[in-house]
Image (spheres, rainbow, N blue to C red):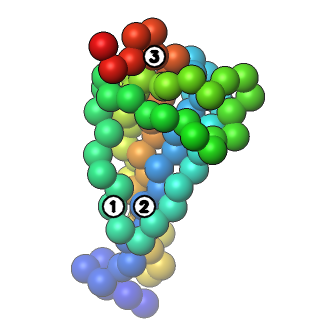
Amino acid sequence: MQDDDTLKTTYTLEIYEPDDDSCVAAVFESETPFMPLSKGEYIHPGFFEMTDTKEILEVVSVEHILWKIEGSHQTQKVCVRTKIASNPFK
């Protein structure tokens, strides 16, 4: 069994569809942390699997979820809620 200091850490970034935190538009997984996203920043959805639009998204909130599976790994999951940007790059 691994000691807590040597557990592998995984990182997950979930970006939700505009105004719908029940529908994930994109998921990214990595062994290294993602750059932080903050409220008010813009995301170009590019290749996201969104149901309705490809418009620029604005970050409205960011939630961090942390958990550990003893003897296996620990995870940081970042949940990014969005809305359609009304006036991006003003």
Residue at 57% of width from left, 23% of height from top?
55
Q: Is residue 70 in view from this perspective?
A: no
* Whole-percent x, y for residue 7 in the image: 36, 79
**Residue ID for mark 1:** 33
Residue 22, given in percent of the width and then of the height, sits at: 64, 29
Q: Which residue is mark 2?
A: 11
In the rendered view, would you say 63 is above or below 5? above
Q: Secondary structure at mark 1?
A: loop
The residue sitting at 48% across, 56% down in the picture is 12
| Disc ID at residue 10 | none
Q: Pick whichever, 49 or 65, lies toward us.
A: 49
Q: Quadrant of residue 74?
A: bottom left
Q: Quadrant of the C terminus?
A: top left
* Frontmost residue, 42 versus 75: 42
SS class, disc 3: loop
- Comparing labels 3 and 2, the label whose residue is closer to the camera: 3
Q: Residues within 10 Å of mark 1 (few under 14, many from 20)?
A: some
Mark pair 3, 2: CA separation:
26 Å
> What's the mark number on residue 85?
3
Q: How many marks?
A: 3
Question: Which residue is situated farthest in the bottom direction here?
Answer: 1
Residue 39 image position (x, y, % from top left): 31, 26
Q: Nearer the viewer, mark 1 or mark 3?
A: 3
Q: CA distance from mark 1 to mark 3?
A: 26 Å
The disc labelled 2 sits on which kind of residue? Tyr
Image quadrant holding the N terminus, namely: bottom left
Secondary structure under tag 2 reads strand
Residue 80 at least partly seen: yes
How busy is the neighbourhood of tag 3: few (under 14 within 10 Å), some, or many (20 plus)? some
